[in-house]
Amino acid sequence: MQKALLITPQLCTGCRQCEMACSYEKEGVFNPARSRIRVFDFHAEARFVPYTCTQCDQAWCKSACPVDAIQIDFATGAKVVYENRCVGCKVCTIACPFGTVNYNADTGKVVKCDLCGGDPACAKACPTRAITYVDAEQTGYDKMRVWAMKTDTAHQAQA
Amino acid sequence: MSWTGKFLRVNLTEGTVKSEALNREWARLYLGQRGLASKYLAEEIDPRVDPLSPDNKIIFTTGPLTGTNASTAGRYSVVTKGPLTGCIACSNSGGMFGAELKNAGWDMIIFEGRAAKPVYFHVENDRAELRDAQPFWGKTVWETDAGLKAHHQDPMLRVATIGASGENGVLFACIVNDLHRAAGRSGVGAVMGSKNLKAVAVRGSKGVRVKDPVRFLKSVAEQKQVLADNAVTSQGLPTYGTQVLMNVINEVGALPTRNFQDVQFDGARRISAEAMREPRRSDGKANLVTNAACFGCTIACGRISQIDPGHYTIVNRPEYRHASGGLEYEAAWALGAATGVDDLEALTFANFLCNEHAIDPISFGATVAAAMELYELGAITSKETGGIILTFGSAEALTALAELTGKAQGFGRDIGLGSKRLCAKYGHPDLSMTVKGQEFPAYDPRGIQGMGLSYATSNRGACHLRGYTVASEIMGTPVKTDPLVTDGKAALVKAFQDATAAFDSAGICIFTSFAWTLENVAPQLDAACEGEWTADYLLEVGERIWNLERQFNLAAGMTAKDDTLPKRLLKEAAKTGPAKGLASGLATMLPEYYAQRGWSAAGVPTAETLKRLALA
């Protein structure tokens, strides 16, 4: 089964545990500035929204890369940056419509989410289940379930 | 690790910035944050200095766990000599700023001297420089935060700043970071203002390292689970915030009302956590929009509120029609019960103003309460207030004064003196509900006896965060004690004070202590930091810090006479509730406390005590 990160912003408290888990997994230090997943705080609207790469099937970043440094991990479906090939040209950062591929000035390479090889650290670290790792074909399951309950009005008719 | 091992020293007089190595021996003895910065302050300034003179220093400091993924590990403190109290001041804040400073590679920043012109301090990893703050001088917290982000083209900049209150010597001016988190008490913002230092703006991307990552991650995961399994930290605080206490404390007859004339407030329910969650009749929405976490916090007690757009306070002020930091318990009490105001929306607006203008809502509300009593006695008249009808229960007076005090204008300048100086100025010093010049927080020591001793002996003046025996006396954590008796409270207060000093020095939030003891903190510190960190040793560190702070205050001129409570709490009994007929039994507890501490009858640490704690 292919899995995907499912983000439920309403559950996010803005704690940044995901950013720390990601940066630790990828960089070996707690460093939110280097996290592949970012939490956005829309303070005036009281909303926190985590955001990261959704692993497009036809990935713009991959298509744009002139040196084939972005490859598909067939086990997870993740688009993975191979640092030994990346030349830091940043074309992928332009090509990605969502801004989820970013340049790291310390290494001269780009970084993006690679789903941690199928066990994403952000999802494990999230204390509120705002980030989960679920069946890619069923990311809407819980939302459908909620609405399914609302559409069944039979019990109201009987009442 | 997990200290960065270096700090910045900024001489504002000379305009110089230099990097210095952290004193590792002091880190072993004082851990970090509150303890370590207090050691630096005590070593570097004469305790008798005028707090608002260039001779005072102000230290922004993180703890060793700050910036790690330990739960709540995003704290920083501001340590200085406080202008409200003349005591050592240490104000602790959450939000994102502390972790950012650590990520920039610094354990602390020590500011000394006074800048000739307004400046702010900009740190971007190794690059740190003083910059001209003239364009931001006089601006609010919210304007300065947005202005600095725009100026540096850096939306991820973390800003800690003062408002006009701190620039103009409001004695309970605070420092606000991330728009609505505050290093709140003792007037640390006024010290910043006295130095012409408007703001500290930080951006860090160096990362935080720990000693033994494998052991650390395991320990952190275990301790997060402890928080997740505890009813207070996993349900009570995220759902209701600290405001979960409003109805509880009112029930036990310990909710100081109308400047401590009463211990129960008939409007408590209307300003409670439950009220914040109820849909309003006007627009069908609740005051509370969501809860929010500070950096790394798996509890998420923060309140984000939105004021009723039709409420009189903002009906003509669209700039306040957005969500921001809502009422925590202490603020709701000070702005509400203390002043007799039961209009939740007005309290929320006053709270917004306190954040926007960087004033401590506890001291502000408590001082307004004292002013209301003075007004009702006729000691203050509408002539002094500029026409404000300052009676108990007036939401209009409260919100008007929040704005005037925040901007240091009109009668707000008198309120900005704090309760002690205000009451003295208007001839009724006994009506000031303060210890060592600092206003009380939200627990009446007649209904919770241990808190009376805790307030009287707190090293930063009246404060709930120096020894929160409410946890034991009301909530039964870690053991239930009777709030109405004085027996055993001396030992309880000492235990809470020492443990709290250790929590405050680690980089984590004291709210974890509803579920954690030092036994839960020690393994995380031990895995993160060089040296050996056990719960027993942390308690010793906490006791050492407490005595260091005490010695600072004694050298600053405090004596045992200052370890007292206002006459009202010692002589006037509670009129209602479970504590009816009781005054504070401080006189019984204090000598026992001195003995427990190993202090003389005059409240001075004995030579033996100092030696035991490596303080002599």
Image (cartoon, helix red, strand yellow):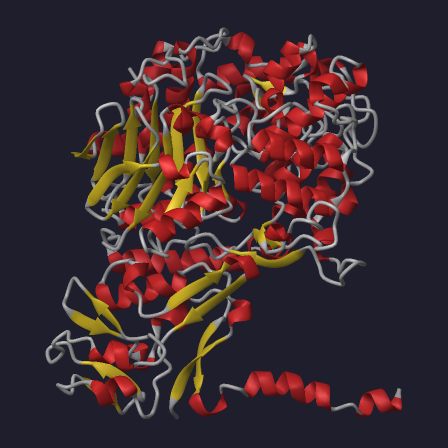
Is residue B264 toward the left or the right of residue B115 in the image? Answer: right
Q: Residue at x 38, y 70 (%)?
A: A122
Locate the N terminus of chain A and report the quarter of the image it occupies. bottom left
Quadrant of residue A46 within the rendered picture: bottom right
Q: Position of residue A33 (x, y in %)?
A: 30, 60
Q: Position of residue B337 (x, y in %)?
A: 73, 35
Q: Residue at x 40, y 61 (%)?
A: A17
Q: Residue at x 75, y 12 (%)?
A: B379
The number of numbered badges drawn on the structure is 0
Locate the C terminus of chain A and report the quarter of the image it occupies. bottom right
Residue B486 seen by the camera: yes
Q: Position of residue A134 (x, y in %)?
A: 45, 83
The correct choice, above or below, for B570 with respect to B70 in the image is: above
Is residue B466 toward the left or the right of residue B578 in the image? Answer: left
The correct choice, above or below, for B396 with respect to B71 in the image is: above
The correct choice, above or below, for B79 with respect to B178 in the image is: above
Q: Nearer the viewer, residue B224 or A144?
A: A144
Q: Position of residue B144 (x, y in %)?
A: 43, 43
